[in-house]
Image (cartoon, rainbow, N blue to C red):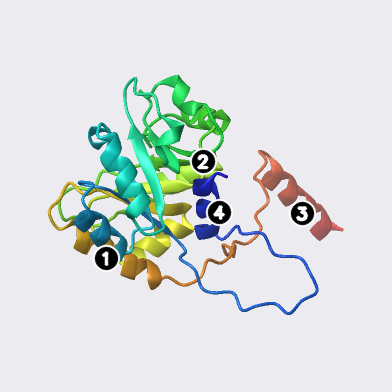
């Protein structure tokens, strides 16, 4: 079973309604955005810190994938969560390693797209043109990972939301934003309603556990997903010459 695909559906609110005549059990409030983290190491302390801070999926960087025994031990001994492996260059994923999904880059080996048990995330560039992005619909990947150019301590701008909405409008795949800093609940709500499904936290900075915890708290503060409101007035398309024709008709009515 593709655990990544099922998890993405759950956090996006696409779970199927159960059929039957029994009493409906109250539905527990679940997260409205998924939270993944790139692990800085495979020791128990780092894994425990990530899970305690709220991560639901752990990604092992390509540089840590060489120690097979340490990988197997970490996966088997950790509490239940999703495990992913970053695949770069010509590296070929091993389905027997126990990973639930793979994080691919455009330079990953083509063979990394084979198989059905493991899920797949693909790193993309939001600046790609519309043709390149639409082609992604044909690839057997479950979601797309991207980053936004945020300088220093500057906050998100309208251009960042537009980039997310552009990806969401062109693609029907879950979108995961890679971050190295916390965001407010207000910013996350706008991004989520713009089409964002999850966050991938980078651990390149020293205070990544606190960043992860702050993002988890902001996600928990989000209101439930709702259908987008459309309050625009209906506007007929402007046809050349229509205004002049309508003016002539009104003059004829006045003369009569």
Give the percent coordinates (x, y) of residue 198.
41, 53
Q: Earlier in the sequence, mark 4 or mark 2?
A: 4
Cβ–Cβ under 8 Å for marks 3 and 1 = no
User: Which residue sits at x=65%, y=78%?
Assistant: 25
Q: Earlier in the sequence, mark 2 or mark 3?
A: 2
SS at circle 2: loop
User: Which residue sits at x=41%, y=37%?
Assistant: 102
Give the percent coordinates (x, y) of residue 34.
42, 57
User: Rounded to the nearest whole Å, what is the CA distance between mark 3 and mark 4?
Assistant: 59 Å
User: Rounded to the nearest whole Å, what is the CA distance between mark 2 and mark 3?
Assistant: 61 Å
User: Rounded to the nearest whole Å, what is the CA distance between mark 3 and mark 1?
Assistant: 69 Å
Q: Please indicate whether residue 60 sits to the left or right of residue 134 in the image.
A: left
SS at circle 4: helix
Callout 2 environment at 10 Å: few (<14), some (14 to 19), or many (20+)? many
SS at circle 3: helix
Cβ–Cβ under 8 Å for marks 4 and 2 = no
Q: Tell me the number on the disc at residue 251.
A: 3
User: Which residue sits at x=26%, y=43%?
Assistant: 149
Callout 4 environment at 10 Å: few (<14), some (14 to 19), or many (20+)? some
Q: Which residue is mark 2?
A: 142
Q: Earlier in the sequence, mark 4 or mark 1?
A: 4
Q: Which residue is mark 4?
A: 9
Q: Which residue is mark 1?
A: 213
């Amino acid at each position: 079973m593709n655990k990544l695909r099922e998890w993405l559906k759950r956090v996006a609110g696409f779970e199927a309604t159960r059929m039957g005549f029994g009493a409906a059990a109250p539905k527990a409030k679940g997260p409205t955005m998924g939270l993944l983290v790139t692990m800085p190491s495979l020791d128990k302390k780092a894994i425990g810190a990530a899970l305690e801070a709220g991560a639901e999926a752990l990604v092992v960087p390509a540089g840590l994938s060489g120690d097979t025994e340490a990988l197997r031990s970490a996966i088997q001994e950790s509490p239940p969560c999703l495990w992913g492996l970053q695949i770069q260059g010509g590296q070929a994923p091993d389905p027997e390693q126990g990973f639930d999904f793979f994080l691919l880059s455009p330079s990953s080996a083509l063979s990394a797209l084979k198989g059905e048990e493991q899920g797949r995330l693909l790193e993309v560039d939001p600046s790609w043109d519309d043709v390149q992005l639409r082609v992604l619909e044909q690839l057997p990947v479950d979601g797309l990972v991207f980053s936004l150019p945020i300088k220093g301590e500057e906050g998100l701008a309208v251009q960042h939301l537009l980039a997310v909405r552009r990806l969401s409008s062109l693609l029907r795949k879950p979108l995961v934003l890679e971050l190295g800093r916390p965001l407010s609940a207000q910013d996350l709500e706008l991004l989520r309603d713009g089409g964002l499904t999850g966050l991938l936290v980078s651990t390149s900075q020293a205070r990544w556990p606190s960043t992860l915890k702050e993002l988890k708290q902001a996600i928990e503060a989000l209101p439930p997903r709702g259908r987008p409101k459309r309050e625009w007035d209906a506007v007929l398309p402007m046809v050349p010459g229509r205004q002049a024709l309508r003016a002539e008709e009104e003059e004829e009515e006045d003369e009569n």
